[in-house]
Amino acid sequence: MRRFLALAALLAVVPDAQALTCTEVSGFTSWSCVVDQVNKTITLTETIPSPTVAGITLLTLDPADVLIPWFITKTVTNGSGENWSNVDTELKVGCETGCDSNQFNSCADSLPGTAFYCSSNDFDGTSFNQPNIPPRVFGSDAFSRLLIDEVANRDFIKFFDCLPTPSDCLDLGVAPDLLAPSGVDVEIFPIISFTIESFQIVQTPNFGVVLETDWGWTHRP
């Protein structure tokens, strides 16, 4: 009985090892992450100082966390001093998964903070909850449009066209409107991983061309 009580006391002070963790990799002047293991939510608060260089967060899942959809709320501040036409978010997985040969990038790319990672594909089980379990929701309180690109070799979302009503947006009179310096956007999106326990969330302002296609958009009220 004494041995049982001693073991119980030890377990009471040992942190639960079965927990998702998030780590700042690079590209932020301020960054914080709060994980709610019970409700499967991740709250990121970030400032990105560059108009073009990515801010990168590493997520590491306990084996108990795979197969479970997580819900991310991300508050990102434009700390670049320049306007943002869009904010892109891409999932990147380790090169050992075989993603190296995809069409968008390879492990030989020398992007800051992305060494040994490349774009997630349809075969690694990591996505923005592409299986749609439960029905997924995306949202932004600054940007009015969303492009979801889930082709065979990439898991990628683009929020763009800043709403003209918030003070953080510049109304140019023609779309797309821009997120002004010091402007703040609150974004929501889901993630899931079936097998991979460590992957990156790579967020890049002003990345690529803003397309006019509007896919799968659910706007946050």
Image: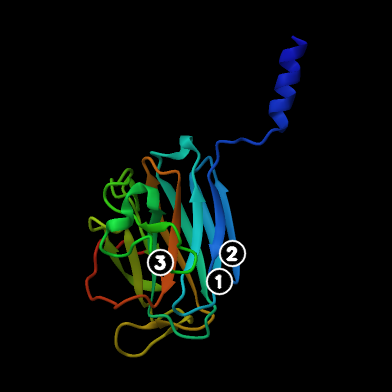
Q: Are marks 2 and 1 in contact (CB under 8 Å)?
A: yes
Residue 37 coordinates in the image, percent (x, y): 54, 42
Circle 3 packing at 10 Å, graded few (<14), some (14-19), many (20+), is: many
Circle 2 packing at 10 Å, graded few (<14), some (14-19), many (20+), is: some
Sequence order check, earlier mark of 1 and 3: 1
In the displayed structure, would residue 12 be above or below residue 136? above
Looking at the rendering, which quadrant does residue 159 occupy? bottom left
Camera-near label (1 vs 3) is 1
Query: Measuring 46% from the left and 55% from the top, which residue is drawn there?
Result: 72
Confirm whether residue 160 shows in the render: yes
Residue 101 coordinates in the image, percent (x, y): 28, 57
Q: Disc 2 residue type?
A: Trp
The disc placed on residue 140 is 3
Circle 1 packing at 10 Å, graded few (<14), some (14-19), many (20+), is: many
Q: Nearer the viewer, residue 142 or 81?
A: 81
Secondary structure found at label 1: strand
Quadrant including the C terminus: bottom left
Q: Give the CA separation, mark 3 to mark 2.
A: 19 Å
Residue 140 coordinates in the image, percent (x, y): 40, 66
In the displayed structure, would residue 51 be above or below residue 17? below
Sequence order check, earlier mark of 2 and 1: 2
Residue under label 1: 47
Q: Disc 3 residue type?
A: Ser
Residue under label 2: 31
Q: Give the CA separation, mark 1 to mark 3.
A: 16 Å
The disc placed on residue 101 is none
Could you tell whether 44 is left or right of 124 in the image? right
Q: Disc 1 residue type?
A: Thr
In the displayed structure, would residue 81 be above or below residue 136? below
Secondary structure found at label 3: strand
Could you tell whether 77 is left or right of 161 in the image? right
